[in-house]
Image (cartoon, rainbow, N blue to C red):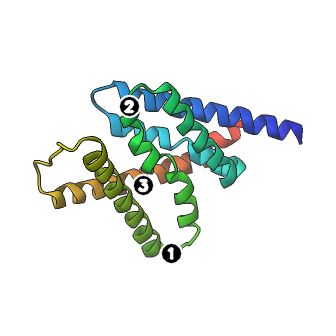
Amino acid sequence: MQNNIGRKVAFGGFVTALSIICLYMASILPTNRLFFYAIGSMFIFTIVIEFGVPFAAVTYLATTALAFIIIPNKIMLIPYLLFFGYYGIIKYYVEKLNHLVLEWMIKLALFNTALYVTYWVVTKMLLETVTFYAYIWVTIILAEIAFVIYDLGYSMIIGYYKRKLRNRIR
């Protein structure tokens, strides 16, 4: 029993460290921020697979708390906090429904809600002078297309982890 707890803590610490590195890169680099948010979010599913959702939620909270301590630009944490960080947990529950149309409806509703909350937080609470130069609907549609690509890539990485990496890590 004690060995299992130690394994959980060590694996959770490793996942947290990798996620923090990705968040730090997203905060300091001028480009590829969404790439680092996406990569940083994909570590949480390993915790879901190996130890279950409760420990994955603890890992997400630990990562978020540490990120607020370590990352100098707190605004850069908003996408992780509002969507990317917990998406692996939500994806796990939604895909257990085993109904493809319903799954995509829920995922898109979640994404659009997170997109709206992010937009509201940034424009109303932080930067009141932010304006969009493109039509808002074009931005939303492009963001949804990017989300679908992200989700499909996420599923491919989960499959690769289960097929190739999981046994090597154990």
Q: Secondary structure at mark 1?
A: loop
In percent of width and height, residue 76 lies at 37, 35
Indicate the amino acid at tag 1: His
Q: Nearer the viewer, mark 1 or mark 2?
A: 2
Q: Secondary structure at mark 2?
A: helix
Q: Nearer the viewer, mark 2 or mark 3?
A: 2
5 to the left or right of 87:
right
Quadrant for the C terminus in the image: top right
36 to the left or right of 59:
left
Give yes or no for contact between labels 1 and 2 (Cβ–Cβ under 8 Å). no
Q: Residue at x 49, y 43 (%)?
A: 41
Indicate the amino acid at tag 2: Ala
Say few, some or many: other residues with alpha carbon within 10 Å of mark 1 (under 14 / 14 to 19 / 20 or more).
Answer: few
In percent of width and height, residue 147 lies at 35, 54
Circle number at residue 4: none
In percent of width and height, residue 142 lies at 23, 55
Circle number at residue 26: 2
In percent of width and height, residue 126 lies at 29, 42
The total of numbered circles placed on residues is 3
Regarding residue 59, the answer to whether it shows in the image is yes
Circle number at residue 151: 3
Say few, some or many: other residues with alpha carbon within 10 Å of mark 3 (under 14 / 14 to 19 / 20 or more).
Answer: some
Q: Residue at x 42, y 55 (%)?
A: 152
Circle number at residue 99: 1
Indicate the amino acid at tag 3: Asp
What whole-number distance in Å separates the C-alpha atoms at marks 1 and 2? 34 Å
Considering only order in the chain, which callout, 2 or 1, is on the residue closer to the N terminus? Answer: 2
Give yes or no for contact between labels 2 and 3 (Cβ–Cβ under 8 Å). no
Foreground pick, 31 / 28: 28
Foreground pick, 110 / 50: 110
